[in-house]
Amino acid sequence: MNFNDSPQESFYRATVREWLANNAPRYTVSRRAPEVERLGIARTWQACKAAAGYARVSWPRDWGGAGGTTIQHMIFTEEEARYGVPLGFFGIGLGMCIPTLMRFAGMATQQRFAGPALRGEQIWCQLFSEPGAGSDLAASRTRAVWQDDSWLVNGQKVWTTGAHYSDYGLLLARTDASVPKHTGLTMFWIDMKTPGVEIRPIHQMSGGSDFNEVYLTDARVPDSQRLGDVGAGWKVALVTLMNERVEGGKDRGPTTEQILALARSIPRGTASVLEDPAFRQKLAMWYVQAEGLRFTRLRTLTALSRGQIPGPESSIGKLVAANRLQDLTNELIECQDQFGLIDDAAHAAMGGSLHHDYLYAPGLRIAGGTDEILKNIIAERVLGLPGDIREDKGIAFKDLPTGR
């Protein structure tokens, strides 16, 4: 397979580069800037992209997209990543939640949310993980009970990225505990300002509070906000999770050019770190990993372009990307010797972004599936190896033993 740009793609890339050069510099912001500042700039940048047809290139024009190809979408995201524009606020909504709505919601709901999300007017989160149901998402205990013509929801979610600034969220809840755990779940969308929804940000070692605890206490959700059939929530969740693997499989952290520039600037003996054979070996490994991520993502985008749901191979990208980020940021900080201790954005290498990425990387190895879960998925669903023994298979959720 030839991964080089075709003449049409080369022309599109040139067009994108010209547009970004004329627009993106106005919206650059440090990752160390206060969240409220980054969010404000992200909204205006998202609106700017939407107006030019770049907010979601591959979406149909009816939804505000450009009606382009998935390869064009990837070309734009590759070129956009070269600028310091804020990118993290809309990925969950546009990459996971809205595609799920498009598949399972009615036309009125799709038309209500697709445009505002695309323009950055609304932000989405996903209310999936719980204190006792992270890696084993199907063990969710948040309950939704039918009462007085609506669903009464009680429970707790945790590690909900962006809940504190989100307008809406996808909510996975248990509606039937008398059946096996995978068959008693139902998916809803919920307004995050619904009475009974309480959000508590979690302070992270990176200094940010991207993750949250979300408590639901007698929160009422109309049945019109249900996605899919009652009890079919796991099927809906799988669509979201597969798209999450695509988002999580993006290469993160400094570019190869930035790594090379930093290595050249750090003295080692009579030369620089870049001349160190051990460092060059690591550099080669990081480059190979980056290319592997790119090609794996191309494979996934090809499946999407054919109308297919991203498959389990997407777990490979997420697993590699998170570990690669942790490894390379650690090495780049360590090779600066005592200067690697500097965390002041005004004096640290790359404006202190290395420290932020290094402290954030462990969270990426948990979010969207832990390393161990992803390895199991790859082993069983990609390589075809025998699955783990599951003692809870076929047992009603209410009969499963619980620890103290």
Image (tube, rainbow, N blue to C red):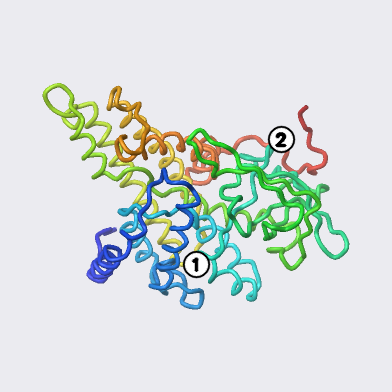
Q: Residue at x 51, y 38 (%)?
A: 363
Label 1 belongs to which residue? 118
**Residue at the extreme bottom of the image, as rendered:** 62
User: Which of the 4 image quadrants contains residue 356?
Assistant: top left
| Quadrant that contains the N terminus | bottom left
Between the residue at mark 1 and the residue at mark 2, the CA separation in whole angstroms equals 43 Å
- Asked if residue 26 lies left or right of residue 364, the reply is left
Q: Amino acid at mark 1?
A: Leu
Label 2 element class:
loop
Circle 2 packing at 10 Å, graded few (<14), some (14-19), many (20+), is few
Three-letter amino acid code of the residue under disc 2: Glu
Q: Which mark is residue 209?
A: none
Image x and y of residue 184, in percent: 76, 51
Q: Nearer the viewer, residue 81 or 69?
A: 81
Quarter of the figure with the C terminus: top right
Seen from the viewer's position, the closer of residues 381 and 54 is: 54
Which residue bears the numbered disc 2? 391
